[in-house]
Image: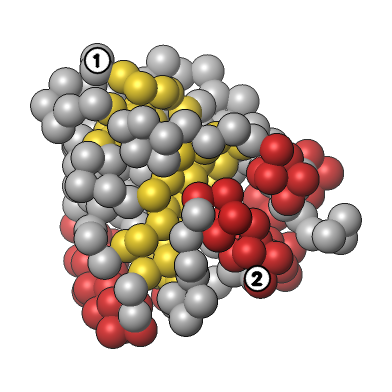
Amino acid sequence: MSALPIDLEAFEAAPVAREPFAFAMVPHFVKREAMAAINADYPLVSHPGSFPLPTLEFGPAFAAFINAIQGPEFARAVEKKLGVDLNGRPTMVTARGVSAARDGQIHTDSRTKLITVLIYMNNEWEAKTGRLRLLRSPDNLEDVIAEVPPDEGTMLIFKNEPNAWHGFHAFEGPRRVIQLNWVTDMRVVRREQFRHRVSAFFKRLRGKPAQEAM
């Protein structure tokens, strides 16, 4: 466990909020000593939007980090933390590198996504905007349950419920975040990867901002 670039002990110790939906936050989930190497090997994502890992190039430290968050140790810890059974549930991972002015709109994730994990790979976040907010309603960014600073290996995990609203005040500029999802079945992975590939292709052509909040 100690060789992993993620801090499973900190994750296991983090409290879980249960209302209005289950979530937990873990500062420095990515170990401090691993951050520099992972960020040096982070894929070049210079356009807004989510990009599936198969469409990106990245170095070995980043690859080891992805293997860790998709590995059995973390999966078992998530099952215990949120009281879910992930046996046979596939994962998919996307990366972002840039936030556009239209990003951050309030939404809930697709119902095919069972668990959402967001891991932020920025340095200390000084901007007042661009901070993900977990919300009580679909139409008010000020009705805040919790705010997640997108800095220095911070991780947010939540169980995808119909009321798991989230969004953020618009930020334009570099903003690195990894999204890991456990999903219902492999058809979702194939469909989402195809959709993201098509979307990423046109975003690269036009620089079109994404609509999801992460």
Q: Quadrant of residue 173?
A: top left
Q: Quadrant of residue 185?
A: bottom left
Q: How many marks?
A: 2
Distance in Å between CA atoms under marks 1 and 2: 36 Å
Residue 125: tell me if it is visible. yes
How is this picture coloured?
secondary structure
Which label's residue is closer to the chain start, 1 or 2? 2
Tell which of 34 and 84 is nearer to you: 84
Q: Position of residue 118 (x, y in %)?
A: 48, 47
Vertical placement of 103 versus 145: above or below?
Answer: below
Instruction: Give the residue displayed 61% in from the left and 25% down from the top.
Output: 124
Task: For mark 2, give the secondary structure.
Answer: loop
What label does residue 142 carry, if any? 1
Q: Position of residue 78 (x, y in %)?
A: 57, 56
What label does residue 71 carry, if any? 2
In this rendering, position of residue 199 left or right of residue 87 = left
Tell which of 163 and 38 is nearer to you: 163
Tell me the kind of residue under disc 2.
Answer: Gly
Sort mark 1 into few (<14), some (14-19) or many (20+) by Cα contacts within 10 Å: few
Sort mark 2 into few (<14), some (14-19) or many (20+) by Cα contacts within 10 Å: few
In this rendering, position of residue 22 left or right of residue 104 = right
Instruction: Give the residue displayed 39% in from the left and 49% down from the top.
Output: 159
Q: Position of residue 179 (x, y in %)?
A: 45, 55
Task: For mark 1, give the secondary structure.
Answer: loop
What label does residue 87 carry, if any? none
Vertical placement of 157 versus 149: above or below?
Answer: below
Vertical placement of 158 versus 16: above or below?
Answer: below
Indicate the quadrant containing the C terminus: top left, top right, bottom left or bottom right: top left
Instruction: Give the residue displayed 22% in from the left and 40% down from the top.
Output: 163
